[in-house]
Amino acid sequence: MRHLLDDLHAPHAALLRAALALASPPGARLAVDIGCGPGLKAGWLAERLAPGGLLVGVDIDRAALAEAARLRPGAWVVGDARDLPMADRCAGLGWCVAALDLFGSPDLALSEARRVLGPGGTLVVASAAQLWARPRPWPAGLVAAWAERAPPPPADGLGDHLAESLLAAGFAGVYLRAYLLDPPGRGLAGAALPLAGWDWLAARLDGLLAPADLAACAAAEAEAEPEPLAVLLVAAGSVA
Ligand SMILES: C[S@@+](CC[C@H](N)C(=O)[O-])C[C@H]1O[C@@H](n2cnc3c(N)ncnc32)[C@H](O)[C@@H]1O
């Protein structure tokens, strides 16, 4: 089965890479890519390692691991995400990209990820899907005012199922962002902004918008209607 995230190599690769980096603290001595496939994202994960750190990729598919080993250095290990072949508390950072919903039991896989991450470790999960969402047609003034800021969180409970799964697996400090995949090329803030709510944004604008733009934003919030859209969810949780 072709996964929607396969299509992110192009033209959405830059967005995915930036969104994963933003959610991932640097400096892990051991990072694990769970469901790494042929290691196409593992090179990005390696950039978050401390100097001399070790990259481990785990996948159930031997052929994909052989391809990963051909492409880059790392420890490429055959294993099931529901029973990771790794010691307790050995890793500082874990990624699970376009894979969690393929594991048969995502909750078991999250518990396993929690088990292998040490104190202060972080798990980052990325998933893309068609989701019902309410894109806000924000005025240009808001888009410009937010362009250099960090991406805001989504409104309307979008992605809450993923955040709740991380909490249920014992992760703390759960972080969630949602990005519209189309049109591509907007950058993190531009792709997240249409999915954010006006109340959240208005409380953080620090008087940046003219009164006409404020009125247009309130109207955009009221006008937004649900529609099925390609959305990238990136959630992260840490081990206390
Ligand atoms: C869509 S691919 C994503 C690969 C990679 N993370 C990426 O983004 O390019 C999903 C991967 O999950 C792996 N997978 C599926 N079930 C698994 C399981 N139970 N344990 C480990 N890996 C599994 C598949 O073999 C496949 O390589």
Image (cartoon, helix red, strand yellow):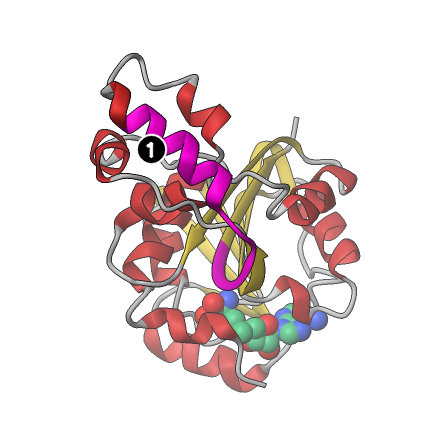
Along the line of sight, the residue nearer the viewer: 33 or 134:
134
In x, y percent, where is residue 146? 27, 32
Q: Quadrant of ligand 1?
A: bottom right
Which stretch did the figure color magenta? 213-232
- Where is 233 relative to 75, above or below? above
Say which quarter of the image contains residue 82.
bottom right
Q: Quadrant of the N terminus?
A: bottom right
The answer to whether the beta carbon of the residue marked 1 is less than 8 Å from any atom of ligand 1 is no
Q: Is residue 130 left or right of residue 161?
A: left
Is residue 88 in view from this perspective? no
Which sits in the foreground, 77 or 103? 103
Asked which secondary structure carries label 1, the reply is helix
Badge 1 crowding class, 10 Å Cα cut-off, few under 14, some 14 to 19, many 20 or more, is: some
**Residue 104 in view here:** yes
Picture layout, residue 209 above or below residue 60: above
52 lies left or right of 93: left
* In the foreground, 79 or 100: 100
Residue at 30% across, 72% down: 10
Q: Position of residue 192 (x, y in %)?
A: 40, 44
Q: Is residue 135 left or right of residue 214?
A: right
Q: Quadrant of the C terminus?
A: top right
* Residue at the image position 43 percent from the left and 17 percent from the top: 203
User: Looking at the picture, does residue 200 appear above or below residue 180?
Assistant: above
Percent position of residue 118, x then y: 62, 36
> Looking at the rendering, which quadrant does residue 14 occupy?
bottom left
Q: Total number of numbered labels?
A: 1
Residue behind mark 1: 216
Q: Is residue 171 magenta?
A: no
Quarter of the view holding residue 141:
top left
- The residue sitting at 78% across, 64% down in the picture is 105
Residue at horizontal 60 percent and vertical 47 percent from the top: 158
Q: Nearer the viewer, residue 109 or 54?
A: 109
